[in-house]
Amino acid sequence: MVNDYLFHIKNRTIIFDKDGIPLGKAPNEKRGGQDYPAYVYNPVGVANHGLFLYNDLIENANRLAFGVDRRAAFDKQVFWLIKNKTGKGNMSFWYHNYPAFAHGCKPPWKSALTQGLILSLLLRACHLTESEEISGLAERVANSMKTPTSEGGFLYVDDNGDYWYQEYMGNLGYVLNGFIFSIWGMYDYYLYSKDEECKMIFDKCIDTLRKNLKRYDWRMGIAKWSVYDLKDKNPVELVYHKLHVSLLRDLYTITKEEFLLDYANRWEGYISQPNMLLVNICRHARAQALKLFKRLKRA
């Protein structure tokens, strides 16, 4: 993942402000007559950058090769998140102030993926600083993850009783990697606080994966792959497919749930040149069919 991150920096899809806070290249979407700057602050990007810095710091590595004071740079990411949080009752969360129209999100919008990654980062900051302010903020983020979406929180329970976290709030697509990163935050908070409610929710989410992972297993003829979400069921790009495999393996290491390892092994087995060629052909054909459908719909 570090190599992918460095690739984005090299290709300037990620840049940094004068304080070392990352900005991501904004989506080229101008619906509603609103223009957006070329680069925007993204709380997910800030959390990711902080987590990379933390790993370099504790491992005495310099994989980001930035030549900066890693601890000071880490602190700046945390301070930015503290400054830009939004509060409601006993909850704290972060808004995305740019559009994600492809996922049905108009700014400002919220994301459980954002909450999970930031919660993981804040707990690592607690490890370094023992700050009561940061610990209190982490508790408020965890509260938001325990609160149902109907009450302004992030926990969604569907009609089947399955527990979900949505990367794009309000879009019932259930992005797989976003869901898993969200529950990692809850597991981290359980390890930190021994909050049994967080552990219960984490276990419920693992049950959700047990019942629904088969829905992410994509087949078209003899082509086999994994999909990004359950709404559009698009076969993912290779980097995301590998991420799915890695995330399932990591979940297996802490839960020992065999179904997670079974899917990780199955999906890793899909990574072969003949199958990948078939998947790319199917993806291209599907994209062209969707373009034609939209063109006919506008006509």
Image (cartoon, grey):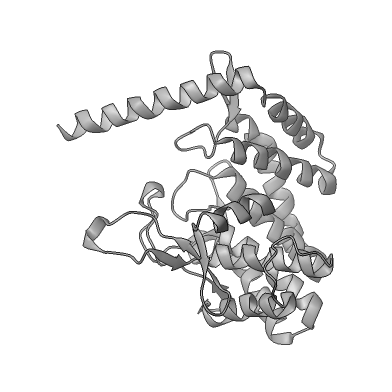
The residue at 34%/54% (across/down) is 28
Task: Name the quadrant containing residue 124.
Answer: bottom right
Question: Which of 13/211 is in front?
Answer: 13
- The answer to whether 205 is drawn above or below residue 295 in the figure is below
- The answer to whether 63 is drawn above or below residue 192 in the figure is above
**x and y, in percent, of residue 116 in the image:** 64, 61
Left or right of 97: which side holds 164? Answer: right
The residue at 56%/63% (across/down) is 45
Q: Quadrant of the C terminus?
A: top left
Question: Which of 150/256 is in front?
Answer: 256
Res 120 visible: no
**x and y, in percent, of residue 205 in the image:** 67, 48
Left or right of 198: which side holds 36? Answer: left
Task: Name the quadrant containing residue 97.
Answer: bottom left
Q: Residue furthest bottom?
A: 132
The residue at 33%/65% (across/down) is 36
- The answer to whether 172 is drawn above or below residue 69 in the figure is above
